[in-house]
Image (cartoon, rainbow, N blue to C red):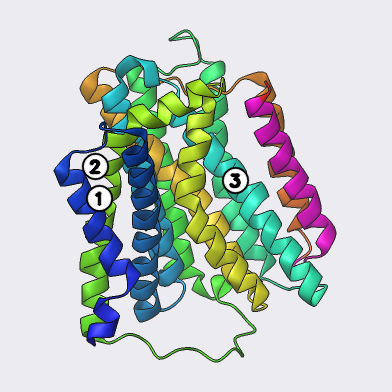
Amino acid sequence: MSLKTLLHWSFIFPLLSLIYYLLGVTDDSPLLAVLGGVLLITSVLGAVHHAEVVAHKVGEPFGTIILAIAITVLEVGLIVSLMVAGGKETHTLARDTVFAAVMLILNGILGACLLVGGIKFKEQFFARTSGNMALISLVAIVVMTLILPNYTTSELSATFSKAQLIFFSVASLVIYSTFLMVQTVRHRNYFLPENDDEPHAEPPTNFESTMSLIFLIICLGVVVFLAKALSPQIENMVHNFGAPQALVGVIIAAVVLLPEGMAAIKAARRNQFQTSLNLALGSAIASIGLTIPCVAVVSIIYEMPLLLGLDIKSMVLLALSLYTVMLSLNRGKTNILYGVVLLVNLFAYIFTVIVP
């Protein structure tokens, strides 16, 4: 690895973020808080960059799985940090963030990929079976963790009892683990891109991959600790704008998903929609299938209330998004209309969060 490679922004900014956190200057001034926010975003981008390097080394479909798990670790770290720092006031944060992640992935990332691919290629093709398997897994986890709590009677206020929380956390892990096994072993061919004519860069060396793995771990740690330190500024910013608390979840999800969304859109522009689909739906399943069990553990350990059930408006928007995605992926080929409809769904969701 050359000196030029070591001076890449993905190595420098995580170290700057670590120094910023260790100096403990997050509460000194609004300007320093903004600087911390910029360093937080660059650390997220750095984490995904290093995950992409490692993913390039191991190949598909393991590469997209590494990206999805890295994103999920970031999301879980941010949620848990804010939950512990905020205490009982953050009892809806996990629900809001997971719901926001699912909506941003289904409508935003997938919609943008469909739109970009439709504009450039008119139609793109993918393995319909892979989309069906991912959507079946996603729908089951979403219904059990975000809708079912509204209709259980052991607890009030759209929450699970401890036994229910443990059961449905295990159920989410079982579904995600089975999907992962299907994606990587039993039906791996369904998730491999067919049109792979684009020239590929040389895979990274063992040393480069090792350095990226080390810095991936550093970035993940920096993001978690820096987000915890900046959590008061994030919440104050939302309150100063007069926006509801749910916007905090949207902000967290958007920051975490931005780099992976960019990777999915780039794949669609290369006429590799199968890769875009793997990134989008795989991230959605990992986001909810791994995040809910993790925050459940935190909730049980710290005896914090965890409200998971969505309100009626959110359930309607979620049902609309899932149904639209199912119809968009049921033919094995795409067009521009699907992308436009999904992006309109996204704008409707964000608008109703700000103006409930």
Determine the secondary structure under disc 1: helix
Q: To which residue does mark 3 refer?
A: 104
Snapshot quadrant of residue 213: bottom left
Q: To which residue does mark 1 refer?
A: 222
Mark 1 surroundings: few (<14), some (14-19) or many (≥20) residues within 10 A: many
The answer to whether mark 1 and mark 2 are in CB contact below 8 A is yes
| Closer to us: 276 or 344 | 344
Amino acid type at circle 1 is Val
Magenta range:
332-354
Q: Earlier in the sequence, mark 3 or mark 2?
A: 3
Determine the secondary structure under disc 3: helix
Q: Earlier in the sequence, mark 3 or mark 1?
A: 3
Q: Residue at x 65, y 56 (%)?
A: 110
Q: Nearer the viewer, mark 3 or mark 1?
A: 1
Using residue 90 as the reference point, say whether residue 102 is left or right of it. Answer: right
Q: To which residue does mark 2 refer?
A: 225
In the picture, the quarter occupied by the N terminus is bottom left
Q: Residue at x 59, y 86 (%)?
A: 196
Q: Nearer the viewer, mark 3 or mark 2?
A: 2
Amino acid type at circle 2 is Phe
**x and y, in percent, of residue 48 in the image:** 39, 62
Q: Residue at x 46, y 69 (%)?
A: 186
